Image (cartoon, helix red, strand yellow):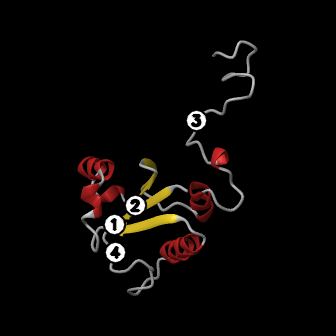
Amino acid sequence: MAAIRIYEPALCCDTGVCGVDVDQSLVELTATVRSLKDQGADIQRHNLASDPLAFTTDEAVRAYMHVVGSVGLPLTVVDGVTVATGAYPTKSQLLAFAGLAGVAPTDRPQLGLTDTSASGCCGGATGCC
């Protein structure tokens, strides 16, 4: 199963229920992460305020923070590959990344890469593009 890591900006809490305004996206993310963990998914959230070490131990995250900074958070990494920046992934995206809910690993989102056909990368008879 894929290792999903979500690196978040400094938050006072991960639920989105703290303070005057409730952040509905954080409420939904918290519920989705808990649900995925219950299904056996390897998913973790790292908050810049409470877990800053996590932002320094992963080379890709450290480089991202050096170039973009915290304004580019949240950052979502799946098996060491950055899959989303600047916004939290949706529930359906997280399910796909985790390989759950009937989504086979080969059916995962390909981040805009073209799909290959059985008869070759461009569908031609020669099997070459």
Q: CA distance from mark 2 to mark 1?
A: 6 Å
Q: CA distance from mark 3 to mark 2?
A: 23 Å
Q: Nearer the viewer, mark 3 or mark 4?
A: 3
Q: Which residue position is annotated with label 3?
A: 113
Image coordinates of residue 20 in percent, x first then y, are 40, 87
Mark found first going from the N terminus, 1 or 3: 1
Badge 3 density bin: few <14, some 14–19, many ≥20, Cα 10 Å: few
Badge 4 density bin: few <14, some 14–19, many ≥20, Cα 10 Å: few
Q: CA distance from mark 2 to mark 4?
A: 11 Å
Q: Dot 2: what SS?
A: loop
Q: Nearer the viewer, residue 29 or 87?
A: 29
Badge 1 density bin: few <14, some 14–19, many ≥20, Cα 10 Å: many
Point 42% across, 56% down: residue? 86
Q: Relative to 104, is 80 on the left or the right?
A: left
Say if mark 3 contacts mark 4, CB within 8 Å.
no
Answer with the quarter of the image where residue 97 lies: bottom right
Disc marking residue 9 = 1
Image coordinates of residue 57 in percent, x first then y, are 26, 56
Q: Which residue position is annotated with label 2?
A: 74
Answer with the quarter of the image where residue 94 lies: bottom right
Q: Where's the C terminus, which quadrant?
A: top right
Say if mark 4 contacts mark 1, CB within 8 Å.
yes
Q: How many marks?
A: 4
Point 69% across, 62% down: residue? 101
Q: Label 4 sits on what residue type?
A: Leu
Q: Which residue position is annotated with label 4?
A: 11
Q: CA distance from mark 1 to mark 3?
A: 29 Å
Q: Label 1 sits on what residue type?
A: Pro
